[in-house]
Amino acid sequence: MKFEKELIVGAIKPSAPYSPGVRCGPVIYAAATATDWKTGLAVNGTIEEETKRTIENLKRVLESADSSLKDVIKATVYLTNFDDFDRYNKVYARYFKEGGYPARATIGVSRLFGNGKIEIDIIALSRKKIRRKRN
């Protein structure tokens, strides 16, 4: 069975050559940082502020693809300062309560786009009817 790749555009303006989200069959792949969704420019702040903005950006992408945060099954979180773990985790937990927490890995990195403190990529299930390619 083959699936068509569908770019999820319009929810967030990318600041580089990437798609904020891609749907392939029943699965959505998306990533976000703490950027202004209209301009794509980084918006720096506290780890709590950046976590909230990053997850809100992911939420926009998912909602534009007929999905939601409760459909997220896997998250990978990148932090530039692992000492921020407890503070980011409190914000993260508020967003992912409904639907159960997704599987998650948190990784320390040296640098992120726009000198941000956090980036999150996710895998989510799609509610959209699947279009299959015919051979």
Image (tube, rainbow, N blue to C red):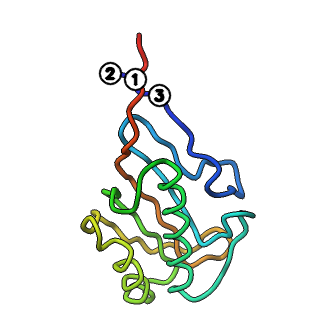
Residue 44 vs residue 62, the one in the foreground: 62
Residue 36 appears in which quarter of the rendering? bottom right
Q: Secondary structure at mark 2?
A: loop
Residue 130 appears in which quarter of the rendering? top left
- What's under tag 1, amino acid-wise? Arg
Q: Which mark is residue 132?
A: 1
Q: Is residue 28 left or right of residue 119?
A: left
Please state the horizontal and vertical placement of residue 104, each as a whole percent of the image. 31, 66
Residue depicted at x 69% and y 56%: 13
- What's under tag 3, amino acid-wise? Glu
Q: CA distance from mark 3 to mark 2?
A: 10 Å
- What's under tag 2, amino acid-wise? Met
Q: Farthest residue toward the top?
A: 135
Q: Earlier in the sequence, mark 2 or mark 1?
A: 2
Is 54 located above or below residue 135 in the figure? below
Alpha-carbon neighbours of circle 1 within 10 Å: few (<14), some, or many (≥20)?
Answer: few
